[in-house]
Amino acid sequence: MFGIHDFPVFLLAGIVLNLTPGPDTFYILGRSLGQGMSAGMVSVLGVASGLLVHTVLAAVGLSAFLAASVTAFTIIKLAGAVYLVYLGWSMLQGKTHAADAKTGNSMAGLMVIYRQGVLTNILNPKIALFFLAFLPQFISPASTFKVAAFMLLGLCFIATSTVWCLLLAVFAGRIRHYLAPGENMAVYVNRVAGVLIIGLGVYLAIRR
């Protein structure tokens, strides 16, 4: 369909890649441990939305600009890293925990977490390059439906990624209840999660 070949191989490879710990994994674990299961699951939806943006950009060819421009790639990469460090620092200062205590389960609070998940993923140019490098391997050069093929493969990858990440969010959210039975312990877990997210930002900034 749409010139896609070796689809079972694509699914298997996608699942293996999703199971491999990466930036999304650590970000979702940090949110789930720091703010609970609801925050983690909403972060998963934000990350999935960011992946959808990258899929659309790759499908229409706009992401190729990142692959061709070292300057654009570096700017977006550093912007994403700085944003992650900012989120982690906010958690260390207790800002995120305070917001969670008051509005973490409200629609407004969850929307903030969702937007942060979207931005975290969109500002990672390595994902755009990954989609450009990985998806074409399973699309026939002769296909006249390359955009549709990109979208279908991207959606399948997002679906498997979302299922796995939701399981991680549920697991980490349940673990948090055992680690943080009281207010003081909850603050401690929140700060550990902040360190985790800051480390992720630094890692993305220095990784080539």
Image (cartoon, rainbow, N blue to C red):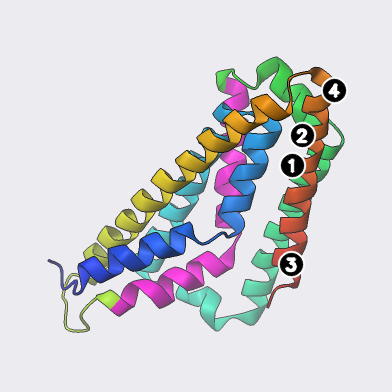
Residue 193 numbered mark, or none? 1
In front: mark 1 or mark 3? Answer: 1
Q: Earlier in the sequence, mark 1 or mark 3?
A: 1
Q: Amino acid at mark 4?
A: Asn
Which secondary structure lies at badge 2? helix
Which secondary structure lies at badge 4? helix
Highlighted range, magenta = 108-137
Q: Earlier in the sequence, mark 3 or mark 4?
A: 4
- Mark 2–mark 4 Cα distance, whole angstroms, equals 10 Å
- Seen in the image, is 175 located left or right of residue 148? right
Query: Answer yes or no: do the residues labelled 2 and 3 have beta carbons within 8 Å?
Result: no
Q: Residues within 10 Å of mark 3 (few under 14, many from 20)?
A: some
Q: Earlier in the sequence, mark 2 or mark 3?
A: 2
Which secondary structure lies at badge 3? helix
Q: Earlier in the sequence, mark 2 or mark 4?
A: 4
Q: Quadrant of residue 135?
A: bottom left
Measuring from the top left, give residue 204's x and y in whole percent: 69, 65
Query: Answer yes or no: do the residues labelled 4 and 1 have beta carbons within 8 Å?
Result: no
Name the residue rendered at 46%, 40% in the picture. Answer: 167
Q: Amino acid at mark 2?
A: Asn
Q: Earlier in the sequence, mark 4 or mark 1?
A: 4
Query: Answer yes or no: do the residues labelled 3 and 4 have beta carbons within 8 Å?
Result: no
- Mark 4–mark 1 Cα distance, whole angstroms, equals 14 Å
Name the residue rendered at 75%, 31% in the picture. Answer: 96
In the picture shown, does residue 20 fall above or below 142?
Answer: above
Q: Residues within 10 Å of mark 2 (few under 14, many from 20)?
A: many
Quarter the C terminus occupies: bottom right
What residue would you read off at disc 2? 190
In front: mark 3 or mark 4? Answer: 4
